Amino acid sequence: MNSSTPSFSLALIRQRYTPFGGAERFLDRAMGALQQQSGVTITLIARRWQGEVMGLQTITCDPPGWGRLWRDVGFARCVRRQLDQRSFHLVQSHERLAGCDLYRAGDGVHRVWLRERGRALGWPSRLATVLSPYHRYVLAAERQLFQSPRLRAVICNSRMVRQEIMDHFGTEPDKLHVIYSGVDVEQFSPALRARFRAEVRQRWSVPPEALLFLFVGSGFQRKGVPVLLEAMAALSGQPYLLVVGADRQQAVMERRARQLGLAQRVVFTGGQQSVAPFYGAADLLVLPTLYDPFPNVALEGMAAGLPLITSYQCGARDLIEQGRNGLLGDALDRQRLVENMRLLQESPSLRESMGQAARQTVEPLTLEAMSQRLLQLYQQLLRQ
């Protein structure tokens, strides 16, 4: 940190820290960049975490509770007690908690997610959502967060989320800062293809010459695996699909793949500590998500030179120029998804040019660029 920047203490709040989560990978990258600066002390406040959290002070907030409602309520109360007992220059929350200085809206706007989810559900499920004490709590917590007089800045990971916050909460535009997650453009690069293509395909029984679609993510329902399986069944030829991610519904999705006659061509790998090799093995990245503020997966896949097929409900649409570096469609428009997948299936030259354009698009979005944007925002808040 340069001499003009004061030393400061930063509290980061994230309820559950897992190496497979996109938000956690943002935290990893942000903390790694900040720890390279002298004078920054970082404390992680979490209910639990997996793996090592190097170089950080940690505070555990894991009061007893039953069910997700009381889990979230208990965590919020515990965090407030900890903040009352300690002093930090800045408190940055990745959860919907009122009383923070800085909130990263990495999960987007809950009411928008419920709206999009409702489009895919039948009326009994929509009614259950309306009556759910948990969703009512989250909606209230979200409203209190954005109404909090202490809230000084919001980090939005896409322009899509920034607009949603303005539309639903009337938050002042100058409080809303779009800071894209950074991507390691050296680790995620087209060179992964030569290194991992043959190895990964052999391990997961994908023929060397087969066209391979790739899906990476947890939360299969939210991120569109059901419609992706239907689209795969509608394609001619023998394309393959790797579904990389941990999800409690994996067995259900595997059964659905068998029902669609895809058992031999759709492979579920489960959660993986490192996803980089899978980008090297694939030809295309497909994320037909119902709602995703901005998945790190999109940045990683594009950096690896993969064209991206995603939805208008994904914040990665910020980066997509239709037909140049990726393709877009509505999350529930199965026919458009089939058309987009078929277009790139049938044109190797278009896949190649779009993959190169995708790489060029994300090259400026480095970890260093992200950390500098964060530091500039912290400096601005500290000066205030």
Image (spheres, rainbow, N blue to C red):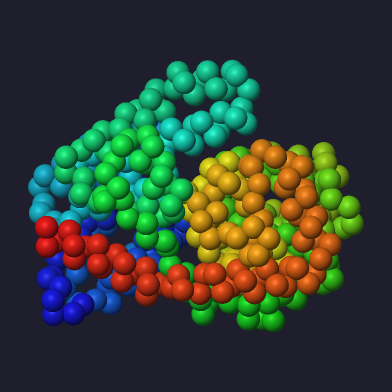
- How many numbered marks have been drawn onto this rendered protein structure? 0
From the top left corner, tell me how far across and down residue 73 is, in percent.
30, 33
Give the image quarter of residue 79: top left
Q: Is residue 166 visible?
A: yes
Which residue occupies the foreground of this view, 329 or 58?
A: 329
* Residue at x 20% of width, y 53% of height: 91
From the top left corner, tell me how far across and down residue 289 is, in percent.
59, 46
* Residue at x 55% of width, y 44% of height: 313
From the top left corner, tell me how far across and down residue 137 is, in percent.
35, 28
From the top left corner, tell me how far across and down residue 320 is, in percent.
58, 59
Give the image quarter of residue 10: bottom left
As drawn, 172 above or below 119: below
Which residue occupies the foreground of this view, 119 or 275?
A: 119
Q: Tell me: 125 left or right of 141.
A: right
Which residue occupies the foreground of this view, 92 or 46?
A: 92
Which residue occupies the foreground of this view, 164 or 246?
A: 164
Q: Is residue 295 visible?
A: no
The quadrant in which the N terminus is found is bottom left
* Residue at x 76% of width, y 54% of height: 341
* Residue at x 21% of width, y 63% of height: 378
The quadrant in which the C terminus is found is bottom left
